[in-house]
Image (spheres, rainbow, N blue to C red):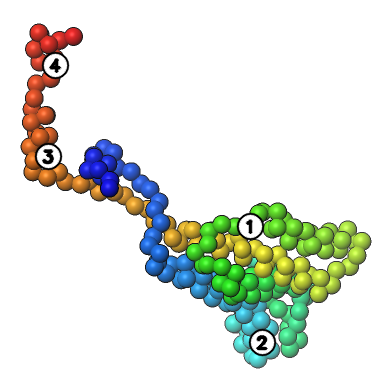
Amino acid sequence: MMSRANRQWTIGNRQSAYVPQAITDRRPLAMWLAVAVFALLLLSLGLVAPVAAASGHPFLSFTIYKTFSHLCHQLPERSFFIAGHPFAVCARCTGLYAGFAAATLIYPFFGSLRRTHTPDRKWLFLAAVPMAVDFSLGFFGIWENTHFSRLATGLLLGSVAVFYVLPGLAELSMYRRNVPTVEPLSSPERMTAVQVAAAPSDYSSPLRRI
């Protein structure tokens, strides 16, 4: 049992600490649901834009295209098409979003949502290698990459990234800042403290000076 001295805190000794929550805390589940909804929303909007353009909703399609233009080059020759209109993002970005969304949905089957440890970072770098090679070969004119190669490399990196992003978010969701409060002294302790404070020091009398 912790002693009373260890439980007491002085006003000038307040500390802040990160402490884990109770096991019944549902915040990791809420975090996972929020990430899943956001990932599916991004993927869906990329498909909604061409459908809206083809069905006579120019303002909606323009808004989506304009929003995603800050995230993707949107080159038509590097994008999939629906009803004669390109996706809001290119094939590689489509793969990234689709891979991230799919891996997020199946993430609970690979372990607890409260898991905070991540795989070795080498696996994330290895997952990025095919995309780097695919981009480099096309950039230097060695080999012309295709919609399938862009989509496949994006799917790989997007799905692997989930296992590094979600553990970090889970750790953030399970920790809170806790500022301990000052524990009031009981009556006997208060009297003792007052008596000690009122007692003369060793320097109050010339005979006791060192």
The tag on residue 20 is none
Give percent across and percent down for residue 151.
Answer: 76, 72
Q: Position of residue 121 (x, y in %)?
A: 66, 54
> Dot 4: within a 10 Å radius of its alpha carbon, few (fewer than 14), some, or many (20 or more) residues?
few
Mark nearer the N terminus (3 vs 1): 1
Q: Is residue 75 visible?
A: no
Determine which residue is flagged by label 2: 51
**Relative side of 47 to 108, left or right:** right
Q: Amino acid at mark 2?
A: Val
Please give the name of the residue rendered at 31% of the width and 49% of the height, measured from the top-left corner. Answer: 179
- Residue displayed at 27% across by 41% down: 6
| Distance from the alpha carbon under mark 4 to that under mark 3 | 23 Å
Task: Please name the residue that numbered disc 4 is placed on.
Answer: 202
* Residue designated by label 3: 189
Check whether the beta carbons of the residues at disc 3 and disc 1 lie within 8 A of each other.
Answer: no
Q: Amino acid at mark 3?
A: Glu
- Which of 26/49 is in front? 26
